[in-house]
Image (cartoon, rainbow, N blue to C red):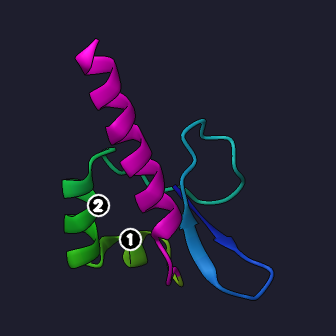
Amino acid sequence: MVREKSADGVIAAVADPRRRLWGRGAWLHPCLQCLALALKRRAIGRALPGVVDCSSVQSHIRALGSAEVVVGEQ
């Protein structure tokens, strides 16, 4: 994930699975438990200073989790 500033000035953490976005990045296991722990420990804010929104990362991890369930059922 990397931090990105939106048009309205909000700094957010954005998922970068291909590792191609510009800027300093931070790595996180792609599971909701690790995201919850990182939020609880405020690790994302320390790794990416100024980040106030992690909803993009959370939705990306949820999408990965649902894709794994579909693949696992087949």
Q: Residue at x 19, y 66 (%)?
A: 37
Q: Residue at x 37, y 50 (%)?
A: 62
Local crowd size for mark 2, using a 10 Å CA cut-off: few (<14), some (14–19), many (≥20):
some
Q: Nearer the viewer, residue 45 or 70?
A: 70
Residue 39 within the segment the image draws in magenta? no
Q: Is residue 53 above or below residue 64?
A: below
Question: For this view, does 14 lie left or right of residue 57?
Answer: right
Q: Which residue is mark 2?
A: 35
Percent position of residue 46, x then y: 38, 76
Question: How many tags in the picture?
Answer: 2
Label 2 amino acid?
A: Leu
Q: Nearer the viewer, residue 65 or 45?
A: 65
Label 1 amino acid?
A: Ile
Position of the C terminus by quadrant: top left
Q: Mark 1 and 2 residues: CB-CB less than 8 Å, in contact?
A: no
Q: Nearer the viewer, residue 8 or 19?
A: 8
Q: Is residue 21 above or below residue 55?
A: above
1 vs 2, front mark: 2
Q: Is residue 7 above or below residue 26?
A: below
Extreme residue in the top direction = 74
Among the 4 quarters of the image, the one containing residue 19: top right
State the SS at label 1: helix
Extreme residue in the right direction = 7
Q: Nearer the viewer, residue 15 or 68?
A: 68
Magenta region: 51-74
State the SS at label 2: helix
Extreme residue in the bottom direction = 9
Q: Which mark is drawn over residue 44?
A: 1
Q: Is residue 70 above or below residue 11?
A: above
Residue 55 within the segment the image draws in magenta? yes
Q: Residue at x 32, y 40 (%)?
A: 65
